[in-house]
Image: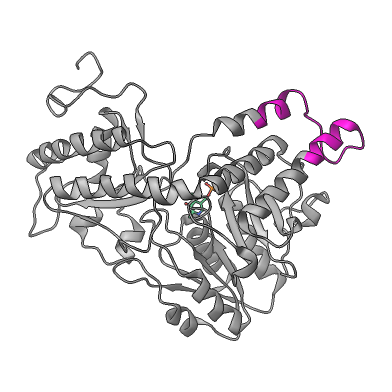
Amino acid sequence: MSADGRQPGLLEGLPPRPEAGIYLDNNATTSVAPEVVAKMVPLLTEHYGNPSSMHSFGARAGDEVATARQKVATFLGAAQPSEIVFTSGGSEGDNLAIVGTLHAYPEKRHLVTTEVEHPAVLGLCRELEKRHGYDVTFLKVDSAGRLDPATVAAALRPDTALVSVMMANNETGVLFDVNEIGKVVRAHGAVFHVDGVQAAGKLPLDLEHMPVDLFAISGHKLHAAKGVGALYVRKGTKLRPLIVGGHQERGRRAGTENVASIAGLGVACDLAANGLERENVEVRRLRDRLEQGLLAAIPDCQANGDPDYRLPNTTNVSFRYIEGEGILLLLDRAGVAASSGSACTSGSLEPSHVLRAMGLPFTLTHGSIRFSLSRYSTEAEVDYVIEVLPRIIERLRLITPFNEQRATF
Ligand SMILES: Cc1ncc(COP(=O)(O)O)c(C=O)c1O
């Protein structure tokens, strides 16, 4: 082992590892913005009241939650702050939307989703099918990861309670046309839930004028804290609570509010709204520079997903003849954090369910890496990756015994 902890051999001769590390895994989670931390700390140390209490400590906490609700509503383009329900994050928002709708329409036993959803939706839908007797249609996507609204229309039935699709895929960044899909769902009279966890903060949103009934977001994907999120519930949408108890969140989600994190989410939403232009110009430029740099320097690789209709910060690249985990490990030793598939499935050697649903061959699903940038990413970071990754791939390919005929490693 060398002085910087690197194994001799595979990383020999690479440029020095950047001291602070390079974080290109922002679809897994983001750093908490300093402005968000500054908002949160006094609410943990000084103004720690319970918003339900009848004294000034409580009133202060209640004001903070109200201000944050207004900020989140403005950020999402909701008509009213009362349409915002604070949650513990994306998984809870998705679960509340889906289960809360099914419980509100007990006579309807069918729901529609896609094969490429995040496990927060996919796992729940499988559970509803297997253990609770619901009928679930899992829609297919095309080879670029796109969902045709006509496919959604064809799946709708008289007993369809809701349709749940993501706005942006966490692994590929590919976008679904939720406006077109929503029109189809609305014409049919079903409820439309959108998992907006990856879209929020990266794309402009105007929910009041979109055909969307429920929209889940997660704080830690947009530089707020982990364990906080929000579900947009369009006024008039029937929804039963998942967590029952106190009267918080107008009876839609019981439990003392996570005041500091909620206030931090409000600040993060302001920052995200102000940073949208940078996200779509500068972050996109850096993402494209990274993707083009890698594709030009590395043979036998390809970028996955619709190249045009996707998030500005995400690139998913497959490298033939090697395992993504091997690449990640060496990238990490070289100081770069990325991901193979979603964070929730990494650690297992199962190929990505998203890439498989897109019909990618085995040789490509196994060697895929997702880079996801943020507004804090820099050109120097991107250029470092373009410099080190081709050498890592070359070295890994030399030592990987790949059998093309049997498609095994
Ligand atoms: C598209 C999508 N939905 C839902 C979630 C779950 O969000 P949380 O981690 O806040 O529960 C994630 C997190 O990766 C996601 O990417």
Nearer to me, 67 or 3: 67
213 vs 296, left or right, is right
Q: Give coordinates of residue 6: x percent, y percent.
A: 22, 22
Q: Residue at x 72, y 53 (%)?
A: 243
Q: Is residue 1 above or below residue 9?
A: above
The image quarter containing residue 290 is top left
Q: Residue at x 39, y 41 (%)?
A: 25
Q: Main secondary structure of the magenta part?
A: helix
- Write down the region rendered in magenta: 39-63
Nearer to me, 227 or 17: 17
Q: Is residue 90 above or below residue 161?
A: above
Q: Give coordinates of residue 310: x percent, y percent.
A: 38, 59
275 vs 348, left or right, is right
Position of the N terminus, as image quadrant, is top left
- In this orientation, does residue 159 appear? no
In this view, which residue lies farthest toward the right?
54
393 vs 138, left or right, is left
In the rendered structure, does residue 96 fall within the stretch colored magenta?
Answer: no
Nearer to me, 45 or 73: 73
- In this orientation, does residue 110 appear? yes
Nearer to me, 289 or 407: 289
The image quarter containing residue 380 is top left
Q: Residue at x 57, y 72 (%)?
A: 133
Q: Residue at x 7, y 60 (%)?
A: 405
In the rendered structure, does residue 60 fall within the stretch colored magenta?
Answer: yes
Q: Is residue 190 above or below residue 28?
A: below
Q: Give coordinates of residue 159: x percent, y percent.
A: 61, 82
Q: Give coordinates of residue 204: x percent, y percent.
A: 53, 57
